[in-house]
Amino acid sequence: MANDTFFSTAHESITQAVSQRYAQAVTNGEQMCCPTGYNHEELGKFIPDAVLKASYGCGTPVGLSTVQPGEVVLDIGSGGGIDCFEASRRVGSSGKVIGIDMTDEMLALARTHAPTVATNLGYPISNVDFRKGMADTMPVEADSVDLIISNCVINLAPNKDKVFQEMFRVIRPGGRFTISDIVADQPIPNYMIHDTRKWGDCLSGALTIQAYWGGLRQAGFRGLHQITVIPWRIIDGIHFLSVTLTGYKTLVSSAPMNPTFATFLGPFSKITDEEGRTFQRGNQQQIDEKTFALLSLPSYKGCFSFTAQPVPISEHDSRIVSIKPDNAPCLWEGHFAILMGPFLEGQDDDHHIFYSGDPLEICSKTIKVLSDPSYQPYFGLINRAKESPHADPVICETTSGCC
Ligand SMILES: C[S@@+](CC[C@H](N)C(=O)[O-])C[C@H]1O[C@@H](n2cnc3c(N)ncnc32)[C@H](O)[C@@H]1O
């Protein structure tokens, strides 16, 4: 069998198995999936019970808190419609919501309740349009969406690179996404990938964090940043995490810009941004429009100081943040840190280099450093030790980079 034919047959059977899984679940009223943080009491004021019960997500679409009235929101894999209906409330009757799903039974449930939700919100007609379609070929116009949301869906799609490209196509320049999904701390082995039943359980199709972030960047998104990371399950030593992340289709202003100087403020001693430029803490660098647009994204907020003129910042300036490790022995306790901030690379003050999405083993001293509020937004932390380790304390040279 030619390679292309093999993949399209495998993709079709995965898609079919996933769709059947959700059709069955919604028909039987089954509860499914993972950690979410909905306020059911609040949502129950305008969303019917049948929809709330068919909520199969793995996070809350916190991106909806950024929604402005009149915006266009797209929900990929809208299921029974819970997030679309909350989006409908937030965009107001002048806004619009599009829900895409491939499973007829899910679409039927969502469409049945759309008029009731509109009435409960006081709208003359529903502003939610539920469309049948696939995440990797969305029936949505290019550059038409302000915000994409998606809750526990992309892991179920066999061709995620195409989904990411589609997201980038439909979102308008300056638009954003906030999606929740299941990811893994290491590649999923073949015995799971080729078990189609496990796809529907959000396991077999999970990407590593590195591949997920990489696919979104490859598609063109920038400012990728975790919002929450919640450990979900450990299966055969693989850590499955529920993550909520955000990213942007950057808009470079066409207005001429005065020279701008950027100084990286920390807490890392050095970082590489998503275009591969390196910034050392405290060093002032001249930047162009494209870099200014990137570093002005909310994900980089607070990391840089911008000035029109070169104004040196002293290392003692109160805006510079640096967190030094304790001068003490270190204990290896099974901790790993995963860089999930917008940087491709970040170096701390103890010679560790963290690469985006790649777990790095760290000792007790570094856990303390990364637990500082200035570092916390950039890292997911996991512990791979099966039992509490009894490792001996290690004394490291401060320049050795051992811990
Ligand atoms: C885990 S459920 C989540 C539903 C909804 N987002 C929620 O939070 O309740 C996954 C949904 O995505 C849909 N889905 C899965 N893969 C899809 C794909 N490749 N294209 C379109 N829809 C898909 C399924 O039909 C199902 O309704």
Image (cartoon, rainbow, N blue to C red):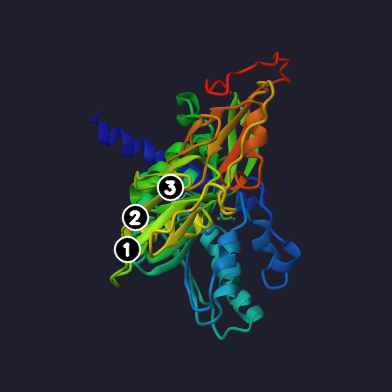
From the image, which quarter does the C terminus lie in?
A: top right
From the image, which quarter does the N terminus lie in?
A: top left
> Circle 3 sits on which residue?
283
Total number of numbered labels?
3
Can residue 138 be seen by looking at this rendering?
A: no
Residue at image point 68% right, 68% down: 48
Dot 3, how many residues are within 10 Å of its Cα: few (below 14), some (14-19), or many (20+)? some
Tell me which amino acid carries mark 3.
Asn
Tell me which amino acid carries mark 1.
Pro
**Earlier-in-chain disc, 3 versus 1:** 1
Residue at image point 48% right, 24% down: 191
As drawn, the label of residue 286 is 2
Dot 2, how many residues are within 10 Å of its Cα: few (below 14), some (14-19), or many (20+)? some
Tell me which amino acid carries mark 2.
Gln
Q: CA distance from mark 3 to mark 1?
A: 16 Å
Say which quarter of the image contains residue 386.
Answer: top right
Q: Position of residue 179 (x, y in %)?
A: 52, 54
In the displayed structure, 369 sits above or below 222; it is: above
Q: Position of residue 359 (x, y in %)?
A: 53, 31
Q: CA distance from mark 2 to mark 3?
A: 10 Å
As drawn, the label of residue 259 is 1
Dot 1, how many residues are within 10 Å of its Cα: few (below 14), some (14-19), or many (20+)? few
- Is the CB atom of the residue marked by disc 2 within 8 angstroms of ligand 1's nearest atom? no
Q: Marks 1 and 2: in contact by CB < 8 Å?
A: yes
